[in-house]
Image (tube, rainbow, N blue to C red):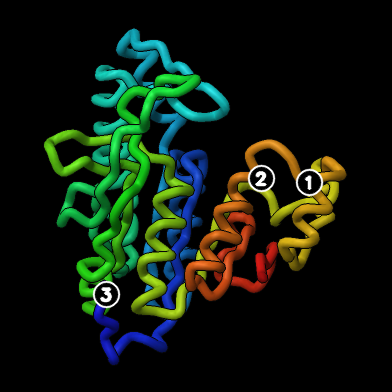
Amino acid sequence: MFLVPQWSKMEKLTVIKVGGKIVEEPQSLKQFLADFSKIEGYKVLVHGGGRSATALAAKLGIESKMVNGRRITDEETLRVVTMVYGGLVNKQIVAGLQAIDVNALGLTGADLNYMRSEKRPVKEVDYGFVGDVKEVNAGILADLISKGIVPVLAPLTHDKVGNLLNTNADTIAGETAKALANYFEVTLMFCFEKKGVLLNENDDESVIKTLTPEFFENYVSQGIINGGMIPKLENSFEALNTGVKQVVITRADQIHTTNGTIITL
């Protein structure tokens, strides 16, 4: 059970998940980090890096296998994603933030034992070394954040018996936000290349400004919301039900504004 520090209960914290495409290109990364630095209050950044992992795997002659958008992670692939997520991409982000006077610390779930997971059981698909989150040591993150440090979280966890596990970045962002809601007033923000959740995927201006569970179910039944957006939104509602104050889905260059889709109960 968490002991809620009195100093931080009403402090605002923004947890932002950014996709690999944005952080893997120097110009878009530089612009994103500049926008990220403008967000007021405490911050946490969760990143992907899948394109870089796929590119490095190809150079090493390792085939990348995906099922429903999830990477099959055998031993060789685990080595690649560890190098890319925990090394190259994470440290480029940290260096970029330090360059604009944001004091950042790059972490995997194994560092400080902040996030423990278990290897996903084999059912219809054997995902290999992929982790399902079981425990978040939010106290250690809250302590770092209270000291003015910005955690930069790579999509890697550990099982506390010596194994690293590839873990979905959206999941890491959601679990981190839920755990930190015991300490802060948390806004969870997913940013990608669109302005928000769209009524018409071919019309970038058709942003749904506010989305409730009722509207979500209606849009899914009509086929307006489909594919990978469904689990992202299901995770968003779960986060709200677990104490997160607000969830926002927006474009990466809009994270310091009020634009995008606000997910609410």
Residue linked to disc 2: 230
Residue 179 in the image: state x and y as whole percent. Answer: 36, 66
Q: Secondary structure at mark 1?
A: helix
Between label 2 and label 3, give the one nearer the viewer. 3
Q: Amino acid at mark 3?
A: Phe
Q: Secondary structure at mark 2?
A: helix
Which mark is on residue 220? 1
Amino acid carrying label 2: it is: Ile
Disc on the earlier residue, 2 or 3: 3
Report, in whole angstroms, how far the alpha carbon at label 2 lies from the one at label 3.
31 Å
Q: Nearer the viewer, residue 244 or 42?
A: 244
In this rendering, would 228 be left or right of 190? right
* Location of residue 72 in the rendering, given as x and y in whole percent from the top left corner: 41, 22
Q: Quadrant of residue 167?
A: top left
Identify the secondary structure beneath mark 3: loop
Residue in the picture at 48% in, 73% down = 243
Decide which of tag 3 and tag 1 comes sooner along the chain.
3
Which residue is under mark 3? 2
Image quarter hosting the N terminus: bottom left
Coordinates of residue 31 in the picture (x, y in percent): 50, 56
Label 3, label 1: how many angstroms apart (C-alpha)?
Answer: 36 Å
Distance between mark 1 and mark 2 Cα atoms:
8 Å
Please say whether residue 114 is visible from this viewpoint.
yes
Whether the residues at callouts 1 and 2 have beta carbons within 8 Å, the answer is yes
Compare residues 172 and 103 and report the one nearer the observer.
172
